[in-house]
């Protein structure tokens, strides 16, 4: 990580364990790499089990 850059945090789905990695995004669902979890659309759901963002916890 370069000086002045903020590391984007990974989040894990509580029910299934899927890890949202902002460096990867969720390209299969239109989320570009580099998209922070906080910037995901409100209607985004876990691509594995379908729960909402409120079921994710910061890693």
Image: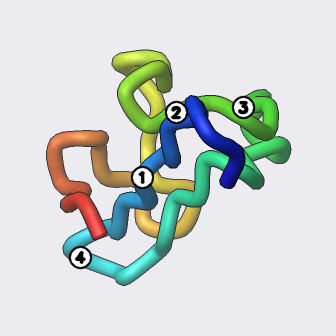
| Residue at the extreme front | 3
- Dot 1 and dot 2 residues touching (CB under 8 Å): yes
Measure the alpha-carbon separation of dots 4 and 1: 19 Å
Which of the marked residues, 4 or 2, is nearer the chain's N terminus?
4
Residue drawn 29% across and 41% down?
A: 53
30 or 59, which is in the foreground? 59
Which residue in the protein does label 1 denote? 9
Which of the marked residues, 2 or 3, is nearer the chain's N terminus?
3
State left or right for residue 9 relative to residue 58: right
Which of the marked residues, 4 or 1, is nearer the chain's N terminus?
1
> Helix or strand or loop: what does disc 4 sit on?
loop
Which residue in the protein does label 3 denote? 31
> Helix or strand or loop: what does disc 3 sit on?
loop
> Helix or strand or loop: what does disc 2 sit on?
loop
State left or right for residue 7 relative to residue 49: right
Q: Where is residue 48 in the image (x, y as percent from the top left)?
A: 54, 68
Which residue in the protein does label 2 denote? 36
Q: Which of marks 4 and 3 is in front?
A: 3
Which of the marked residues, 4 or 3, is nearer the chain's N terminus?
4
Q: In which quarter of the image is the C terminus?
A: bottom left
State left or right for residue 33 relative to residue 43: right
Q: Quadrant of the N terminus?
A: bottom right
Give the class, few, some or many, for how many residues have Cα within 10 Å of label 3's Cα (few <14, many ≥20).
Answer: some
Residue drawn 47% across and 31% down?
A: 44
Which residue in the protein does label 4 denote? 15
Relative to 15, residue 38 above or below:
above
Q: Position of residue 25 (x, y in %)?
A: 70, 45
Instruction: Specify the label residue 46 is tagged with.
Output: none
């Amino acid at each position: 990580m370069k000086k002045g850059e903020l590391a984007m945090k990974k989040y894990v789905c509580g029910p299934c364990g899927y890890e949202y990695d902002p460096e990867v995004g969720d390209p299969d669902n239109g989320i570009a790499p580099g998209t922070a979890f906080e910037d995901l659309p409100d209607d985004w759901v876990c691509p594995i089990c379908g729960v909402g963002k409120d079921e994710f916890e910061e890693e």
